[in-house]
Image (tube, rainbow, N blue to C red):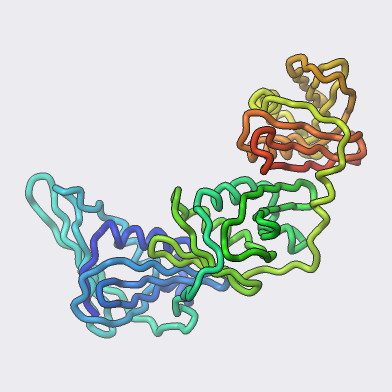
Amino acid sequence: MEFFISTSDIQRAIKLLNVTAKMNVTSFEGQIFIKTGEDNVTFTSRNNNSGLSCVVLAKIITPGIFNVLYSRMKSFIMTFNPWDGEFGAKQFHFKVNHPKLKVNVEIFYENGNSSKSNLNLDYIKESAFLTPETIEKPNLILNSSIMKSAIDKALYAIDPQGVEKFTKGLRMVLKDGIISFTATNGVVVSDYRVANESELEEGEYFLPYEFLMGLRRILMDDLQLFFDISKQKIKISFDNVLFWSNSLSYDRWPATDSVWGNFDKIVELKREILLSGMSSFIDLLDSDDFNRVTVGMKEKQLFLETDSSFFEYPTLDENLEFLIDISGKDLINSLNAISDDDIKFKCLDSKNGVILESSGFDNQKAFITNLTLKRR
């Protein structure tokens, strides 16, 4: 095997592979599989739960395959500045002379001088686990900005260390022309909905936390994401990258849809004002008391209160009265997840939780369970 590949292209591939490849391990989880095509090279890595392959244009001299340790390849490849038109490393030259892979690079400097560097990598017997996945026909297409928003809005409500499986990822439901992304850790619920314009009309899927975090790292704005999604596996393809993961299953999803109608009071609030009030005493919340904050309203005045701090919202038109204890950190996370200047604050009584809802878009909402235990 022999090929030439540009520095910027190989460095991008190495960065992408970092999502699934492990450093400083010799098992298949720390290996990358290199395979040439007619005018490209495919780099693949995977671990027990997920994998990634990246196709990069290259000048192929001799086709072939090779398996190497990711950590050694990364430490060498990422050392050099890519060619900027005048200085840096233009390309890498990969050449196999079994049982070694030699990687050569020439670096050009401002004074007209150049230097050369090379790395010898040992051949590692290929693992069947490193075979790249493929997508024959996508069954769902989404814009990357929608997927990124869904992940960002849900992360605070996911608990990867939770006992229940439903806390360990993001539920995606396609029904009645809508795609619903819902996450819950049993205390808070995050819900984000978009129109479904795909051929996949109905279905319920679960995206694991590890997969979401990996996808979040490699997504770029305004790309088309091609999904091949089933109960067993999730595959996403974009821009010559294929990322996949095993699906998770849960015994029963909690009745999160039932919380949205449980209110009889609505207050229209400015999100930034409420956030500034909470942020002013976020460091004063008592973790031993569940980060408790009391949200109350009386005589057209909404307020936030802890044992040592008090915030009063500007006078409102609504003349309502309520008093509810919730987690201040959950309140801040929920407010940060809603992308709207105006929100609807909904509640029933002290025995029920709080609903926060986007006022302008009607597709983003959060639920925060009330604290039933009394203040210490």
User: Image point 91% across, 34% down: which residue?
Assistant: 349
> In the orientation shown, which residue stands out farthest toward the left?
112
Query: In the image, residue 83 lies at what x, y percent?
Result: 20, 52
Q: Is residue 27 left or right of residue 315?
A: left
Q: Is residue 118 above or below residue 143?
A: below
Q: In this view, does 144 lie to the left or right of 263?
A: left
Query: In the image, residue 170 lies at what x, y percent?
Result: 66, 57
Q: In this view, does 339 lie above or below 235?
A: above
Is residue 376 among the parts visible in the rendering?
no
User: Image point 67% across, 43% down: which residue?
Assistant: 363
Give the quadrant of residue 122: bottom left
Q: In this view, does 299 lie to the left or right of 14?
A: right
Question: In the picture, which quadrant includes the C terminus?
Answer: top right
Residue in the foreground of this view, choosing between 320 and 336: 320
Query: In the image, residue 223 lies at what x, y percent?
Result: 44, 53
Is residue 272 among the parts visible in the rendering?
yes
Q: In this view, does 245 lie to the left or right of 7?
A: right
Give the quadrant of residue 132: bottom left
Query: In the image, residue 1 lies at what x, y percent?
Result: 24, 80
User: Image point 70% across, 48% down: which residue?
Assistant: 191
Count of picture labels? 0
Q: Is residue 44 above or below residue 368?
A: below
User: Image point 22% across, 77% down: which residue?
Assistant: 2
Give the quadrant of residue 354: top right
